[in-house]
Image (cartoon, grey):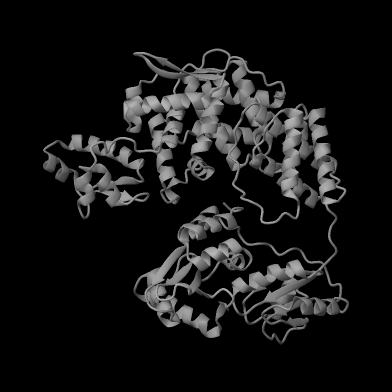
Amino acid sequence: MLRLLLLNEGSLLIDDLAGTFSIGRRTVSRDLDVLDKWLSLKGARLERKQNHGIQVLCFGTDPADLIELINKPDSYLESLPPFKRQKLILLYLLFNNREIKISHMANTFFISDTSVWNDLNQIEKSIGDKDIALERMKGVGIRLRGSESYIRMKFLSTMMEVFSSRTIIPHLYSLKESRESTLEINQFNMLMERLRFPVGNSAVQKQIRRAVSALGYSFTMSGEALLYFYLQLTLHRIKAGAMIVRYNSFRCTPLFFNLAQDILSDLLERVFSGAIPEGEIAQLGMILQVLEIGDLKSVRISNFESMIDDEIRDLTARMIERFGELDKQLYYLNHHMEEVLNLSLASLVIRLENGVPYWHGDWGSSSSEEWRRGEKEEYLSSLLKERCGLDPSGRDLEYILILFQSLIISESEVPPRRIRCLVCCFEGIGLASYLQSVLQREIKGINIIEATAVFKIRQEYIDEKGIELIISTFPISDINIPVIDISLPLNKEKIKKEVASLLPLLAPGRDFEPVIAGEEVSFQEVLNLIQNFMMYRLAEAPDIDRVISSLSAELTGTGKKAKKLEKDFRRREDLGTLEFEDYGIRVLHCRSAAVDGPKAGVVDFEADDRARILFMVAPDPCPEQIRKLLSVITISFLENSSFRRSIISGALKDIRKNLMDIFKDVL
């Protein structure tokens, strides 16, 4: 049946399949359910539309590979790599509080009984813990026995090993429809279906909102995701008869103990008769207590006083002293800021002691060592090992360091007033943003509030924003403030001298409020830009007129939109070209009403493998956050050597990987 669906051009109706194989419609429907599960493990799925038929959609594999695979006699077996398969089987065993037969697991994951047996041997070696053990009962099945609290933490930590936070968090917030399908997302959905894991349990989400309201602050998205899955898992396992009877969490404060008791009472009022075991309450209270929170400024430290003992305060004092020695500065934090740092260290220590996992954001690696991150991570790691016997992960250490860095910045003295400056670069907004970053870093005494490619600067705009100086690559007249004319490439020393000579002449002026930033760019906008970043190949030699015509048709299709985009490209080119001659890269960009959202990519030429064109198109009108999003690409090309090499080489996979690193703060 699958071979017929793959080889057929277009869709087939259920009646067609039933007639071909001389079986009933209900049998076909059941067989299609089985096929859909098998395909979900191979990077494909069945699209079933009423009155339109059935067809196979491939997003993680090639149809030819599927045809080759199903021609093998054992094609229904071994659909997943062993490591991933073993983790999924472990999750299946951890979730279910009962014996499961080998044949049942073989049918669930489309593998042979022998493979299940071998996978169980590997699982037994990998867990290797005294808190949990694999029991095999002949004729009955397989189950995991051990500490209930450990089983739940093991389920969550294993889930984090298999699935990234970018798959987990959108599932929690019901964003599945807005995401492009991937093999990981399909495998995650398959696992949730196999486990019969509750989806969209409003009772659980109601209790999370209750916790947020009672505590007066919001958890981070990762913290809320962990709490969601823990409560779902707790509800399921208690229904199956598994409970935490004893649990020692001496640092769980009364506030969190009482809140945990209320949450569990509401969730289990129809399931549990009698008093809820104190161990259940203490474990949930401890998890509520150590989850990282969204806004540290709103934390009431009095809620956590019993967590922060003398040992933690000593760790914090040693850390501040050592970091000051490394940076050759004397750091001073006020009482509240020091308590926030104490709280974060205490939460980290208790979380590691009790094995509570956490979906940290992927911040990537730092591009600069100006704040000695490596030495600080090494010191903090050794301190926690020596004093607490803990082995924190790199992301745990990085979180503490980023928190420390933000605290010392917020506690630093207010810098002296700087001249409010506008940067104008007619060559394009990307280059204007690049000039802004360079000048802001190199020239002291100026505060660049905006970079623009607008040709006409109005006096009303200058007065409204309180601009006192303009640095421009083209002449500007009819305004009453100084203008420094610059040319490319930049002569930084000349600009410094001109700014220094103007500083005494400029009146102190009035202090303006900071310019209100536009709406922040969303996670989905960045993700769409990265996923849709394209490599467009042309056979002919690089000719800008042909490139514009072909690219416009590729981006919008034929018709009026293509002509509109082509016209906008040419109008922008008539104003002046932007080319990085040192790297052999030309930039083609414009704003156009022909597109609905930002588009970017690279044009590659088969006739000249050294020529590349980086193109970017913004919608018209263009929101401020979209303009900044596209300008980051140009800035990164000039400042990020790894991204620049990937553009020059034309390696699309490397380009997207670098873009993920560049936009990691948003993602």
Q: In this view, does 328 lie to the left or right of 546?
A: right
Q: Is residue 52 visible?
A: no
Residue 61, how many percent across, how many down?
Answer: 35, 49
In the rendered structure, the answer to whether residue 596 lies left or right of residue 40 reads right
Can residue 212 be seen in the rendering of this structure?
yes
In the displayed structure, 27 sits above or below 471; it is above
Residue 393 figure quarter: top right
Residue in the image at 47% along x and 61% along y: 652
Q: Is residue 22 above or below residue 148?
A: below
Residue 484 is left or right of residue 190, and the answer is right
Establish if 322 lies above or below 608.
Answer: above
Q: In this view, does 480 lie above or below 31?
A: below
Q: Quadrant of the N terminus?
A: top left
Residue 20 or 74: which is nearer the viewer? Answer: 74
Q: Position of residue 128 (x, y in %)?
A: 53, 23
* Residue lying at 39% horizontally and 34% vertically, measured from the top left: 193
Q: Nearer the viewer, residue 381 or 40?
A: 381
Measuring from the top left, give residue 228's x and y in whole percent. 54, 34
**Identity of the residue drawn at 40% across and 38% down:** 81
Percent position of residue 526, x then y: 53, 57
Along the horizontal axis of the image, is 497 left or right of 105? right
Write down the quadrant of residue 516 in the picture: bottom right
Q: How many marks?
A: 0
